[in-house]
Amino acid sequence: MTARVLVVDDLLPNIKLLEARLIVEYFDVLTATNGPDAIEACRAGLADIVLLDVMMPGMDGFEVCRTLKSDPATAHIPVVMVTALDQASDRVKGLDAGADDFLTKPVDEIALIARVRSLARLKVAIDELRGRAQSSARLGRNDPFVVATAADGLNGDVLVVDDRASSSDRIQSALRKQHTVCIETNPQEALFRAAERKFDLVIVSLALANYDALRLASQLRSLESTRATPILLIADLDDRTKVLRGLDLGVNDYLMRPIDQNELIARVRTQIRRRRYADHLRDDVEQAIEAAVIDPLTGLYNRRYFDSCLPALFSQASQGVKPLSLLAFDIDFFKRVNDTHGHDAGDEVLRALSARVRRAVRNIDLVCRLGGEEFVIVMPDTPIDVAARVAERVRRSVEAEPFGVQSGAALVPVTISIGIAERQRTGSPDALYKSADKALYESKTHGRNRVTLAAA
């Protein structure tokens, strides 16, 4: 997978060295010799990944990284710090600044390429989420990127898969002040637990006895419920080949033994923060989709959803030669409610009526508000005689008890008129709806508060 890599270093020989290594692997390389230029390039959307030197005059790499990670427009861009600093405290400082990784000079070429490829895959996934979330901002919703960028990496739910008590105890001791830590010694049980519970991070030891830890990582990536869960490997110095293979499989990060507790804490926080960033965007996309098909007043599906769903349900019923019934109903004399008690009271009636109707039908039945006081119920796998009994139940549930409005100050009696039609073999979705609507008209012209079946 290729990507646009921005190399930031104040020394031209260092830039040329990294540039040559990356171009051989077919990455597009941009360069900058100072922090402000790097920030400007990222804000212009020119970089997918940043390889950032720490020791630069003026604005050092730590400050550049903090600036990028605090800006909603650039917080999603992976940053790898590349520096001669090799102390654990330096790595922790970089990770605390928001860096996604920290590579020490002289840079291991294979490790560099593996890490850049891994982050390139991550960037593609995040960009897809950002593209979808962007539409919600255009629709007037709160800026999803500001909320996502504010996500922290604390109070996470962490699963540690390690069959050595001395190792897992050290990990738990380091993390338990900031996170909930669960220890699992059996890799298969760990897979089941991860699938059943939404962990923020899974830490896997490469030193598992009698089990291939990379197999577990692969299984976590293959399950829908754990596909987005970050994985952090704990490795020994001689596990370099396995670590690189793990990055190719989708492992997010790794830490070498002996474990520096502060670096472990920082890397865990980074992974959980990144997970929550993606989760916020994903939730925003789902909410935007829901807002497009849900009636905000009643919580029922709207006309747009009905128009898109009815043809699909009709086609399924036709292919399976199964019955499909449609109920069309509206509130009798609803204008009187608005004229007498006000539109706010009318809204209260619509909300309460919708709740009663939902309780009277099955979960698989599609209940929609088409607009005003007009509603439909689509009932899959239901013949018209059964639909008629359900319609009577709905009608009685509405009529049975007046609706309280204005905080209970007034009680409003309400009734509904219903028309029912069943799918015909030679019919169409539009004909089904029109037939039910015609039956509804018959109910209204013959006294209201009744159920009428469409003529066969």
Image (cartoon, rainbow, N blue to C red):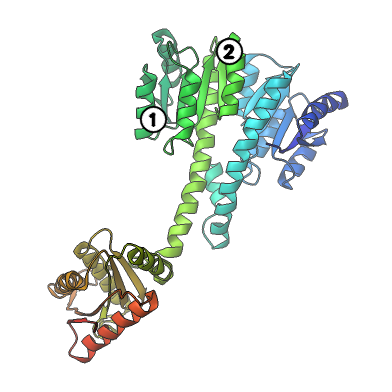
On the image, the x and y values in percent for residue 52 come to: 73, 29
Q: Which residue type does callout 2 highlight? A: Asp
How crowded pointer 2 is (Cα within 10 Å; few <14, some 14-19, many 20+) is rated as some
On the image, the x and y values in percent for residue 392 come to: 15, 74
How crowded pointer 1 is (Cα within 10 Å; few <14, some 14-19, many 20+) is rated as many
Q: Against 422, is 299 above or below?
A: above
Q: Which residue type does callout 1 highlight? A: Ala
Q: Against 36, is 181 above or below?
A: above
Which element is circle 1 on? helix
Q: Against 4, is 311 above or below?
A: below
The answer, for residue 230, to whether it is visible in the render is: yes
- Is residue 9 toward the left or the right of residue 448 in the image? right
In front of the other: 136 or 441? 441
Residue underneath mark 1: 194
Residue underneath mark 2: 239
The answer, for residue 295, to whether it is visible in the render is: no
